[in-house]
Image (cartoon, helix red, strand yellow):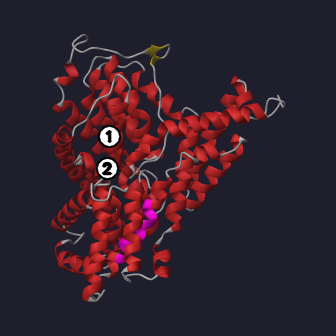
Amino acid sequence: MAMAAYVKLILGSVAFSIFWVLAVFPTVPLLPIGRAAGSLLGGILMVIFQILTVDQAYQAIDLSILVLLFGTMVVSGYLERADAFKYLGKLLTWKSKGAKDLICRICLISAISSALFTNDTSCMVLTEFVLKIARQNNLPPQPFLLALASSANIGSTATPIGNPQNLVIATQSGVSFGEFLVGILPATVLGLVCNALLLIFMYGDLLSVKKGQQDSTVAFNGDGVDHQFSPATMSHVETTNVDSVHHHESLRNRVNSKQAMGAAEVPWSLNGAYWDHRNQKLWKSCVYIVVVGMLVSLLMGFNMSGTAITAALALMILDFKDAVPCLEKVSYSLLIFFCGMFVTVQGFNKTGIPSALWELMEPYAKIDEISGIAVLALVILVLSNLVSNVPTVLLLGARMAASAALISTAYEKKAWLILAWVSTVAGNLSLLGSAANLIVCEQASRVPDLGYTLTFWNHLKFGVPSTLLVTAIGLLLLKS
């Protein structure tokens, strides 16, 4: 792509820089408007500076990705209502054999739930439960919270619906759900094992704390830990969504109360407030059947966005009541962020800067050479932590694929898988590298009477070796 006019190059860089600052530092003192508004600002500036026309800005927005995100968020909301995460949480303590066993269980359950329901959702609903389990057993929360966050990121690499950047890659690359899963699953499994072993190695002394060495203030119920899950609001990029949890919960309760009052005169109504225990079990079973059907359809190669929105609609119909409470749990700020980001990245591409930088790097980043893969991985790792993983995917994806296709079509698929693997695992490097990390940190600090602050440096001490080790091992196992 030829370099744009000098003035447009400068203006386009300014617009992208504003987007980057607000994406990485959403509460920067000079303009504390948050990531979603910052993304929109970047996109609007690209139009105002005439880097893009209005029509080009609209064309830059990928509706299929937005529909897929929306559908998976709605499905996750219904899964939470069907107690799917509660049952996963109970598996953590069932016949547990000690702290190290608990670490391994957290890693496994966090990874599986993230692959199926996205990493941010898993962290949102499991953080409080994991923290209470640690307190219940008089164990330090730090290694357990690190296990939850890091395993959520690693586990989410396995499927196209595990995280936002995978959604983008699956949509742009044309790699099917099944091909994606088969190609990256071995790396995910071994990476997860290495991550768990590293946790046990680094925090072995802390995990050996005897009962009574810490104060335990956990409340118990008949099942063990008193778990009060937060709503599965998707906050992939807008961590301030955590503040709206209580608002959503109270609003949902008010809506349900009004519906129950409206149905009082119709005792045989299918309204959920009047379902007996058997009907509640039937409804939950229907939710699980729909979700399994969605996963099977994805594995069979059906259109991902169409499958996700169909499953979401089916769950709304089966619920047989106003869907507004569930729709309110969708993170619309995330969808807005994606819209602005698509426009901003497209405008930055039009300046010619990304293409010029890629032309300089391409001779050293051949995907058929070990040194080339190492260079690619390093660039993705650095960019993912500087500009975030989704913009990195948008900037590098098509260029990496085109370069790999010149060597072989098989290498084209491998290029996409490398991008998915490294850009996601890169989120474990620092506390700011992934929204899942921030969700765990925020949620843990807000638990009444049990709050724990996971600091940047405590995360970094584990994040750096974990990221480098898991990334390297995974690159050896990716299948083209």
Viewer can see residue 410: no
Q: Position of residue 379 (x, y in %)?
A: 21, 64
458 relative to 221, above or below: below
* Quadrant of image for the N terminus: bottom left
| For residue 46, side relative to residue 249 (left or right) | left
Secondary structure mostly seen in magenta is helix
**Residue numbers of the magenta segment:** 337-347
Residue drawn 46% across and 24% down?
227
* 199 vs 197, nearest the viewer: 199
229 relative to 350, above or below: above
Report how many numbered discs are placed on residues in the image.
2
321 relative to 39, above or below: above
Residue drawn 37% across and 62% down?
38
Circle 2 SS class? loop
80 relative to 39, above or below: above
The residue indicated by pointer 2 is 434
**Amino acid type for the residue under numbered disc 2:** Ser
Q: Earlier in the sequence, mark 1 or mark 2?
A: 1
In magenta stretch: residue 18: no
Q: Position of residue 73 (x, y in %)?
A: 52, 49
**Amino acid type for the residue under numbered disc 1:** Ala
Q: Quadrant of residue 417?
A: bottom left
Disc 1/disc 2 C-alpha distance (Å): 9 Å
Residue at the far top: name it. 212
Cβ–Cβ under 8 Å for marks 1 and 2: yes
Q: Quadrant of residue 352?
A: bottom left
| Residue neighbourhood size for the residue with mark 2, other residues' Cα within 10 Å, grouped as few (<14), some (14–19), many (≥20) | many
Q: Any mark on residue 149, and which?
A: 1
Residue drawn 18% across and 75% down?
361
Q: Any mark on residue 192, and which?
A: none
